[in-house]
Image (cartoon, helix red, strand yellow):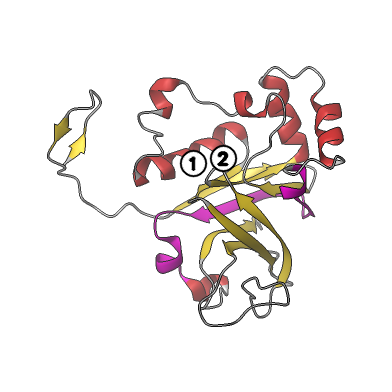
Amino acid sequence: MRRNDRFHLEPAQDLETVPLVSADFDVPTGRLLLTDTLRVSGFSNGIEFDADRAYGALSLNHEAGCVARTKAHASEHGLGFAQTTNTYVVAHLHPTSGRIIVSECWTSDGKEDADGDAAALGWKKIGTFSCDVWRVTAVDQATACALMTAGGNASARATLDAYLASDDTYAQNVLRLDVPAGPWRIHSGPDFAERVDRAAFDIPDHIMPWLVLEPVTA
C-alpha cells in the first residue's frame, strides 16, 4: 500500500525499481564545500522548494522523491545533493580521475586506516563529516553565497567566511576542497552501494559508497 496526495492508503501499482541518478551542477570557482548542510543564515531558505513540491514530487519519504530532489537541487540550486541516513561518512579523492567517493566510515572486513575509518586502496582520504540531517551537500563557495543571498542574507560572503574560520562545531564538519572549476556530476540513488558499477568508477569492494562526484570532461 501507499499514501496518495490526500494521504489516503491505496494499492501501490508502480513497483518498478527506481533508477540511480546522475545530475550535473557547476563549480565555478573550484572551491568546493562538502558536508551535510551549511548551518549559516540564508542557506536553508535559499535551497527550499515550495511545500507542494517538497512534500509531493520531491518528498524525502520515498526513493523516487529523493532521486527527483537530487536532480532539482543540481538544476535549480547548482549543488550536489544525496539523501543518506543518520550516519558518519568519509570522503576519498582518486589521484588520476579526480573523482570523489563519499562512503560510510565503517567497514566490516578490517580494512581501516589509522583513524579507524574505512580505507580505500588507491584513493587519498580527504576527511570525514557527520550527516546529522541525513544528507550530503556538495556546493561551490560562490554558489553557497548566492543561495544565502537568495535566502535573505544581505552579507552572505562575510557570513560564510566568518563561519568557516570559526571554531563552531559544525564549521569543522565542512570539508573544503580545491577541485577543477567547471561542471561536475553527482551519481547516487537508492541502494547505491549495491547497484553502482564499481568497476566503472574504480570503487573498492569493501567500502559502502553513498555517492560519487566527478568532474565532467569534454
Gap between marks 2 and 1 measured at Cα: 5 Å
* Position of residue 162 in the picture relative to residue 14 (left or right): right
Say few, some or many: other residues with alpha carbon within 10 Å of mark 2 (under 14 / 14 to 19 / 20 or more): many
In terms of depth relative to the viewer, which is nearer, 86 or 121? 86
**Placement of 125 over or under 171, stated as above or below:** below
* Position of residue 143 in the picture relative to residue 159 (left or right): left
**Placement of 111 over or under 78, stated as above or below:** below
Say few, some or many: other residues with alpha carbon within 10 Å of mark 1 (under 14 / 14 to 19 / 20 or more): many
Q: Quadrant of the N terminus?
A: top left
Q: Give the image location of residue 52, x and y in percent.
A: 39, 21
Q: Are marks 2 and 1 in contact (CB under 8 Å)?
A: yes
- Residue 136 visible in the snapshot: yes
Judged from the image, the secondary structure of the residue bearing numbered disc 2 is helix
Q: Amino acid at mark 2?
A: Ala
In terms of depth relative to the viewer, which is nearer, 9 or 182? 9
Q: Give the image location of residue 144, x and y in percent.
A: 72, 34
Q: Give the image location of residue 21, x and y in percent.
A: 45, 51
Q: Quadrant of residue 101?
A: bottom right
In terms of depth relative to the viewer, which is nearer, 132 or 156? 132
The residue located at (36%, 32%) in the rendering is 57
- Residue 174 visible in the snapshot: no
Q: Give the image location of residue 212, x and y in percent.
A: 57, 60
Q: Quadrant of the C terminus?
A: bottom right
**Callout count:** 2
Q: Name the residue that disc number 1 marks.
A: 71
Q: Name the residue that disc number 2 marks.
A: 74
Label at residue 17? none
| Range of residues picked out in magenta | 171-197
